[in-house]
Image (spheres, rainbow, N blue to C red):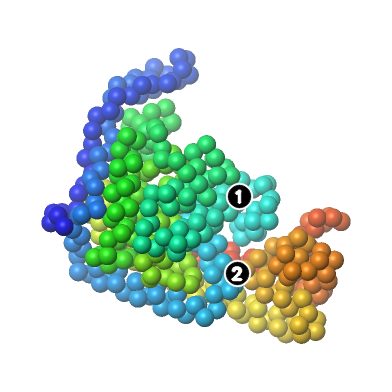
Amino acid sequence: MVSAPWPAIGTEARAWQSTISPGLVSNRVRQRHSGPYRAAVVSEIADQTLALPTSVAALAEDASVEIARFDAELGAEVAPFASVLLRSESASSSKIENLTSGAKSIALAELGSKDKRNATEIVGNVAAMVAAMVAALALADRLDEDAILAMHEALLVDVQPEIAGRWREEQVWIGGDSFGPHGAAFIPPHHDHVPALMADLVNFTRRADLPLLSQAAIAHAQFETIHPFPDGNGRTGRALIHAMLRGHGLTRNVTVPVSAGLLTDTNGYFDSLTAYRQGDPSAIVEKLANAAFAAAANGRQLVLDLREIRQRWEDTIKARRGATAWKLADVLIRQPVIDTPTVARELAVTPQNALRAVAPLVEVGILEEFTGFARNRMWQSRDVLDALDDFAARAGRRG
């Protein structure tokens, strides 16, 4: 391994061909976006030595223990909490990108509603997380470029199919304006460098000599610095964290909602990425470790709330034991908005029998119909939706 400080990014001059149409903007804007610009030069890290402050390394180790404990606590009762936590993490990851939807909109999107673009895109992020987990489990010893491309494709195939699952083939930038990179807050490396940098990053993720949480944090920061896609980098990069945690065996049963932990201080999260680019990897490691603690606490509260809701229903449902209404109550904990096809599929019954499962829950107020339609009706569990929205609200508050 190379013994040296963590490399800060450099810059290189690149020619810029303006595509601004005459008369579209002022001469001042045209002049600002003429001539060469400076794109980031990102060092390869596959063989880089990692030296963290003792306090940060200890914090990351403690956070790893907490993640493993959280995973083990819920391991004996994966259903329904695994899917709930996965959905919650996906919504939180999307919220960091200002893609914000309530629990009901997300649930509706999962049933096929296209009315809320944000919620539909968040559901794509759920698919990306699932793709990350599948890739990590099937290819635990070889998380590769194809797996990362698959995560991105799952994320954006329904909303931006023209870029889904492909490395970018153009310069991108963060901040500034849409007319060119000049004056941007950060200009990632030129797209010519992306394939080689991503191959190096994959090699870094395969190393077995680094503490896993620190390794995952740095891989995430390197991914965001490379910015290999035109869009969806943040969400795909956070999915990569989960792929590494699962692929290296730190989590086995559930998704620890670390994005919900990052939401407690999004400015600090972005600042830690900036510090990484300046040659300080400790900031992103510390941020992810603290996010893991916050995520475990918030995730435990969500699970506790859902358990209490399900226990209250035990004293409310009037149907005989063994009736399909009881089975539907279990489904609602992970799918709080339902329609007849969903109930029929989940319970393996006919549509007519699906309505028989719904009726007893409507009678006692566990479910309420909210469309007002005579056909294509939908029902919601307000209790579960409130618990999910409370989780999201806690995630957005500093602890």
Residue 80 position by quadrant: bottom right
Residue 18 position by quadrant: top left
- Where is residue 64 drawn, in percent x and y? 34, 72
Q: Residue furthest left?
A: 3
The numbered mark at residue 387 is: 2
Disc 1, SS: helix
Dot in front, 1 or 2: 1
Q: Residue furthest top?
A: 22
Asked whether, in this view, residue 105 is left or right of residue 374, the answer is left
Q: Which residue is drawn at 39% across and 63% down?
A: 140
Alpha carbon of mark 1 to alpha carbon of mark 2: how far? 21 Å
145 or 375: nearer the viewer: 145
- Where is residue 4 drawn, in percent x and y? 13, 54
Residue 340 position by quadrant: bottom right
Earlier sequence position, callout 1 versus callout 2? 1
Residue 398 in the image: above or below residue 95:
below
Q: How crowded is mark 1: few (under 14 residues within 10 Å), some or many (20 or more)?
A: many
* Type of amino acid at the residue the image marks with label 1: Thr
Rendered-image quadrant of the C terminus:
bottom left
Q: Residue at x 39, y 32 (%)?
A: 170
The numbered mark at residue 199 is: none
Q: Are marks 1 and 2 in contact (CB under 8 Å)?
A: no
Q: Which residue is drawn at 36% across and 21% down?
A: 17
Q: Which residue in the structure is indicated by mark 1?
A: 120
Rendered-image quadrant of the N terminus:
bottom left
* Type of amino acid at the residue the image marks with label 2: Ala
- Where is residue 321 drawn, in percent x and y? 76, 85
Confirm whether residue 362 shows in the render: no
Q: Which residue is drawn at 68% across and 81% down?
A: 312
- Where is residue 162 drawn, in percent x and y? 52, 36
Disc 2, SS: helix
